Image (cartoon, helix red, strand yellow):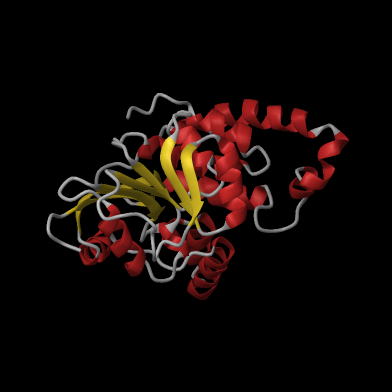
């Protein structure tokens, strides 16, 4: 795939109520769009289907699965999938070798123990050339946070760690593995690490962290009140959404287009694992 879609503008139009979310997702999907996704394709932890619709340019994905029925219902209505079902990642209801590709976007960090899931993904991938492509926060995520760095620079290491722990709790992140650690985990699932690529450069994560505070992500604020679904009938939110798209698609464009330089850290990590023949 080639990242020809303007992910920033498209995601701002969807996540206008939480613009920093749109920025992170836009950089993430721009990175993921550089990979190829041969069918049949499984979207593991598909959520409401929005990511698949945007990433795959409204071309239906073969199968979407998610453990939460409310998400499954939304995904079914999204038109992003040929088939959607409720299932658990530790017991996928598909035969061995059913898929050429599995994809997962910012899901695995929310699972305390990923080993059973990786074993199941390895099982349902086609032998020798089946690939698992997924994005997660990187092992560098915590230390690239703006307010973590700010506290650390002032000598307040305890405060820095406390802030990072608060972010972990808010985002429900359970782990941040290095590429080498992911290689070992993939091997347990019968897959070999084919690629590990950092994305979300330091300036992008620091902007994201500052803007989360500005927009009241995770806490009450004037913005969270104005963007509340309870005030949808007031009629002004459509204008507010247009303002967000116009302002931030321009203002954040340089950050959206920024790549992680070779050898530099990034807050996100794209991993590609390839199924190895004869291994489970």
Q: Residue at x 18, y 51 (%)?
A: 127
Residue 147 horizontal/vertical position (percent): 54, 59
Name the residue nearer the viewer: 35 or 102: 102
Q: Seen in the image, is 264 located left or right of residue 215?
A: left
Q: Residue at x 70, y 58 (%)?
A: 219
Q: Seen in the image, is 125 located left or right of residue 219?
A: left
What number of labels is visible? Answer: 0
Q: Seen in the image, is 104 located left or right of residue 231?
A: left
Residue 278 horizontal/vertical position (percent): 12, 59
In which quadrant is the C terminus drawn?
Answer: bottom left
Q: Residue at x 49, y 33 (%)?
A: 54
Residue 20: tell me if it is visible.
Answer: no
Residue 96 horizontal/vertical position (percent): 26, 55
The single residue placed furthest to the left in the displayed view is 278
Q: Seen in the image, is 118 located left or right of residue 78?
A: left
Q: Quadrant of residue 116?
A: bottom left
In which quadrant is the N terminus drawn?
Answer: top left
The single residue placed furthest to the right in the displayed view is 234
Q: Residue at x 26, y 51 (%)?
A: 125
Residue 51: tell me if it is visible.
Answer: yes
Name the residue nearer the viewer: 162 or 80: 80
Residue 59 horizontal/vertical position (percent): 44, 29
Name the residue nearer the viewer: 85 or 112: 85
């Amino acid at each position: 795939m080639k990242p020809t879609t303007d992910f920033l503008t498209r995601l701002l139009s969807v996540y206008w109520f939480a613009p920093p979310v749109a920025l992170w997702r836009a950089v993430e999907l721009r990175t993921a769009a550089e990979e190829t996704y041969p069918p049949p394709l499984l979207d593991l932890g598909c959520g409401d289907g929005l990511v698949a619709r945007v990433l795959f340019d409204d071309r239906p994905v073969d199968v979407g699965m998610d453990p939460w029925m409310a998400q499954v219902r939304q995904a079914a209505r999204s038109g992003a999938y040929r088939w959607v079902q409720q299932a658990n990642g530790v017991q996928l209801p598909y035969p061995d070798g059913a898929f050429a590709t599995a994809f997962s976007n910012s899901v695995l960090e929310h699972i305390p123990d990923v080993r059973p899931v990786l074993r199941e993904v390895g099982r349902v991938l086609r032998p020798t050339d089946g690939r698992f492509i997924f994005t997660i926060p990187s092992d560098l995520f915590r230390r690239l946070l703006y307010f973590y760095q700010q506290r650390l620079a002032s000598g307040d290491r305890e405060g820095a760690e406390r802030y990072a722990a608060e972010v972990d709790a808010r985002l429900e992140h359970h782990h941040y593995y290095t590429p080498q650690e992911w290689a070992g985990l993939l091997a347990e699932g019968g897959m070999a690490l084919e690629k590990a690529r950092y994305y979300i450069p330091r300036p992008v994560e620091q902007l994201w962290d500052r803007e989360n505070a500005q927009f009241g992500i995770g806490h009450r604020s004037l913005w969270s009140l104005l963007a509340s679904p309870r005030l949808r009938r007031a009629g002004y939110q459509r204008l507010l959404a247009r303002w967000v798209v116009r302002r931030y698609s321009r203002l954040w464009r340089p950050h959206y287009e920024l790549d992680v330089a070779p050898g530099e850290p990034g807050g996100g990590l794209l991993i590609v694992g390839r199924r190895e023949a004869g291994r489970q």
